[in-house]
Amino acid sequence: MSDFEHAVELTDVTVSRNGMVTLDRISLTIKRGEFAGIIGPNGAGKTTLVKAILGLIQPDSGEIKVFDRPISELGHLRSKIGYVPQIFTIDLNFPVTVCEMVLMGTYGRLGIARRPGRAEKDAAMAALEKVGIVDLKDRPIGRLSGGQRQRAFIARALANNPDLLLLDEPTTGVDVATTGNVYTLLRGLKSEGVTVIMVSHDVGVVAAYIDTLACLNKSLVAHCRPGETECNNALQAMYGCDVAFLHHGDAPHIVVEEHE
Ligand SMILES: Nc1ncnc2c1ncn2[C@@H]1O[C@H](COP(=O)(O)OP(=O)(O)OP(=O)(O)O)[C@@H](O)[C@H]1O
Ligand SMILES: [Mg+2]
């Protein structure tokens, strides 16, 4: 796609839900090719932020740009954004197979009038291969395990070769080995030039894979690199306990000290 400098740029964005301010004057820039994590306590506004970037929720004020353009002017570039929603927002009784669902990921480039053809089917199969679930392609999505389902949703987001991938807690309910595979997969996408923004509660694990961490608690507490003092201070401010990244080998990990 055409050149862009910033994958996502929010300037002074405020969002309300049910009359309550949920995101308060957020300014945040995610550079092209960055692997960014978003963390924060329950109700901090992480999902709201992701949906605002996708244009699914309108801000009260401020500006949101994706690929250096206001989201209202994205046009066909909208299909270059992949999205893996938070799991509990998904209707698992929806009667489609894994393959059909992944194929839906290509509808953005097709428009509503055209039916998927050979190219779209090949793209769907390639995405299933990437996440290692080709053998499950004919299974209804309601009959997958948690980890298999997350892989299917990631495959759907990948089917259109996105330049920007947004994932809202993609490893919830996923076992440790599969979680590692998902992160390794995302790191591989990053090395191919894809910008990845991932909401996660797995701060410690995530820190080993990501470039930057956006610490969110209604306002943006910090946007920093894991291990930096700013990041440690932000975690302490958000979780109200002694939390810190410790460098251990190559990978920073997180330590939470419980108070008596
Ligand atoms: N559909 C909705 N309508 C009204 N308010 C909502 C809606 N969804 C979320 N909220 C409210 O907005 C605030 C932020 O919610 P959001 O889902 O963005 O948090 P989150 O950080 O993603 O939390 P979690 O870690 O639990 O997923 C919360 O106070 C929540 O109650
Ligand atoms: Mg959420």
Image (tube, rainbow, N blue to C red):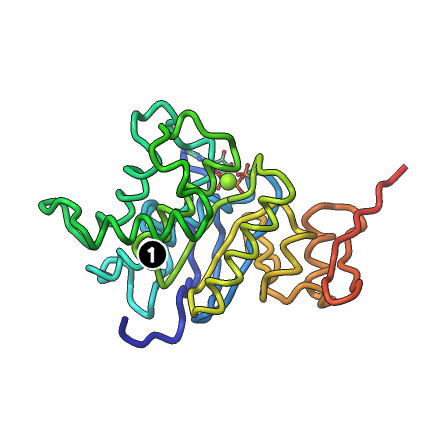
Query: Observer-nearest residue: 50 or 99?
Result: 99
In the rendered image, residue 25, in percent from the top left (x then y), is placed at 47, 57
Residue picked out by circle 1: 81
In the rendered image, residue 30, in percent from the top left (x then y), is placed at 47, 66
Q: Is residue 112 left or right of residue 63?
A: left
Amino acid at the residue labelled 1: Ile
Q: Residue at x 43, y 25 (%)?
A: 143
Q: Residue at x 67, y 52 (%)?
A: 205
- Residue 32 sits above or below residue 154 on the image: below
Q: Residue at x 44, y 64 (%)?
A: 195
In the rendered image, residue 122, in percent from the top left (x then y), is placed at 27, 52
Query: Observer-nearest residue: 69 or 210?
Result: 210
In the rendered image, residue 123, in percent from the top left (x then y), is placed at 29, 53
- Residue 179 sits above or below residue 192 on the image: above
Query: Observer-nearest residue: 139 or 194?
Result: 139
Q: Is residue 187 left or right of residue 75?
A: right
SS type, badge 1: strand
